[in-house]
Image: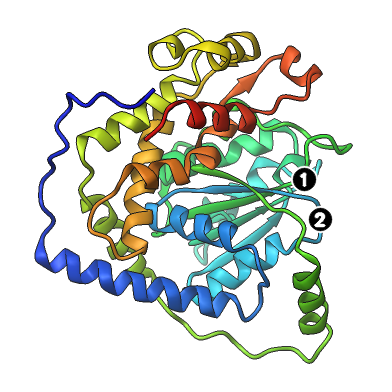
């Protein structure tokens, strides 16, 4: 089923200065990718989505087996964009205060004692939460407030995060032993869930060659934190036609068993009703539109299209669709259901 044609496709024109800035952004994106390619071989789609999340102001979760350069990719990005970077290795014994910080008792020169908050590693531009599902939910939840509100509350005091602030987390496949599934509320804070796959044979040969030679020098700086903040504001000003927004909302509502029938029918509808416990919420619609704006701007285009929405639909929606035990028993993944919805609802 296609989006309704009754909705006007008109939108406010973009400012002339912003058109020029979008063209500059496209050049900066190409330079950033070229810099990253000095250390990362392949994974072009993952890199594209990583940059979309960054320029959209979102967070991303990377899923894959160890050894696929997930950590190296984030480190490389921070160096290329001149962002402060901290890495936390999540382990079963990690405490929330190890993430956010803690109060310590200081004694001044006058002998008076007072508590002073010592900021934890979360206070940075890019936080790499490495193997986030290796730690129990109590510690995982320490990231929630910072990811949503860009601040941390400790001992009744609120501490603001630096800007820009992004959490890029890595996760081992949930089937492996010693892992704790992320709660749905935490999963929903991530704009994208990106599956990092094995490289091709040619890529693996290139990886072995480059990583067994002498260490490479520092990477060129492409963008500053101030420029990234300007880009994030620019992305918000990119216009989106009404039919594009409507298409995004229809995709999201089609993942919900109680409203899917408004937009899909036949076998796809039957699968949603049979296999899905909960569909994606409104935050998914927001991220689809924001991601579409960012993708268009990164490619030098002054307006988002339905194709931009569809290009990011799986990494935005799949981790927000909660399937039941019937789906697990039959090997049906949320990403499969999202793809079937895309095949049913044509742009």
Q: Tell me what residue is drawn at x 38 percent, y 75 percent.
A: 28
Check whether the beta carbons of the residues at disc 2 and disc 1 lie within 8 A of each other.
Answer: yes
Q: In which quadrant will I find the N terminus?
A: top left
Q: Quick check: 274 above or below 340?
A: above
Q: Is residue 179 left or right of residue 119?
A: right
| Label 2 element class | loop
Q: Which residue bears the numbered disc 2?
A: 66
Q: Quadrant of residue 182?
A: top right
Q: In the image, which disc is placed on residue 28?
A: none
Q: In this orientation, which residue lies closer to the viewer: 43 or 81? A: 43
Mark 2: few/some/many CA within 10 Å (<14, 14-19, 20+):
few
Q: Quadrant of residue 15?
A: bottom left
Q: Quadrant of residue 274?
A: top right
Mark 1: few/some/many CA within 10 Å (<14, 14-19, 20+):
some
Instruction: Estimate the x, y position of residue 54 in percent, counting from the top left.
Output: 45, 57
Q: Quick check: 50 above or below 240?
A: below
Instruction: Estimate the x, y position of residue 19 in percent, counting from the top left.
Output: 18, 66
Q: Is residue 79 left or right of residue 281?
A: right
Disc nearer the start of the sequence (2/1): 2
Residue 152 seen in this snapshot: no
Q: Which residue bears the numbered disc 1?
A: 172
Instruction: Estimate the x, y position of residue 113 in percent, counting from the top left.
Output: 54, 52
Q: Tell me what residue is drawn at x 61 percent, y 14 percent.
A: 271
Q: Tell me what residue is drawn at x 56 percent, y 56 percent.
A: 118
């Amino acid at each position: 089923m296609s989006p309704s044609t009754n909705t006007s496709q008109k939108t406010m024109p973009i400012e002339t200065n912003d058109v020029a800035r979008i063209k500059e952004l496209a050049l900066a994106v190409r330079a950033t990718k070229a810099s990253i390619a000095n250390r990362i071989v392949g994974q072009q789609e993952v890199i594209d989505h990583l940059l979309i999340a960054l320029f959209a102001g979102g967070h991303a979760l990377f899923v894959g087996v160890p050894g696929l350069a997930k950590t190296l990719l984030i480190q490389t990005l921070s160096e290329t964009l001149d962002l402060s970077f901290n890495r936390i290795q999540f382990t079963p014994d990690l405490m929330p205060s190890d993430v956010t910080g803690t109060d310590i008792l200081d004694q001044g020169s006058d002998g008076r004692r007072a508590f002073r908050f010592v900021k934890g590693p979360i206070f940075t531009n890019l936080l790499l939460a490495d193997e986030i599902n290796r730690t129990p939910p109590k510690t995982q939840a320490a990231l929630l407030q910072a990811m949503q509100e860009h601040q941390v509350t400790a001992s009744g005091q609120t501490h603001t995060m630096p800007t820009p602030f992004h959490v890029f987390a890595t996760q081992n496949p949930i089937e492996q032993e010693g892992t704790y599934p992320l709660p749905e509320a935490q999963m929903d804070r991530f704009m994208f869930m990106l599956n990092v796959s094995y490289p091709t044979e040619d890529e693996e040969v290139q990886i072995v060659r480059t990583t067994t030679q002498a260490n490479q020098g520092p990477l060129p700086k492409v963008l500053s934190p101030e420029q990234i903040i300007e880009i994030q504001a620019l992305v918000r000003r990119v216009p989106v036609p009404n039919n594009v927004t409507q298409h995004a909302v229809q995709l999201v509502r089609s993942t919900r068993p109680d409203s899917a029938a408004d937009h899909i029918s036949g076998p796809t509808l039957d699968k949603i009703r049979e296999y899905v416990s909960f569909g994606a919420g409104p935050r998914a619609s927001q991220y689809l539109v924001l991601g579409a704006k960012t993708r268009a701007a990164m490619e030098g285009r002054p307006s988002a299209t339905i194709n931009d929405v569809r290009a990011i639909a799986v990494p935005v929606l799949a981790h927000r669709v909660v399937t039941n035990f019937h789906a697990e028993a039959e090997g049906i993944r949320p990403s499969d259901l999202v793809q079937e919805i895309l095949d049913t609802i044509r742009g």
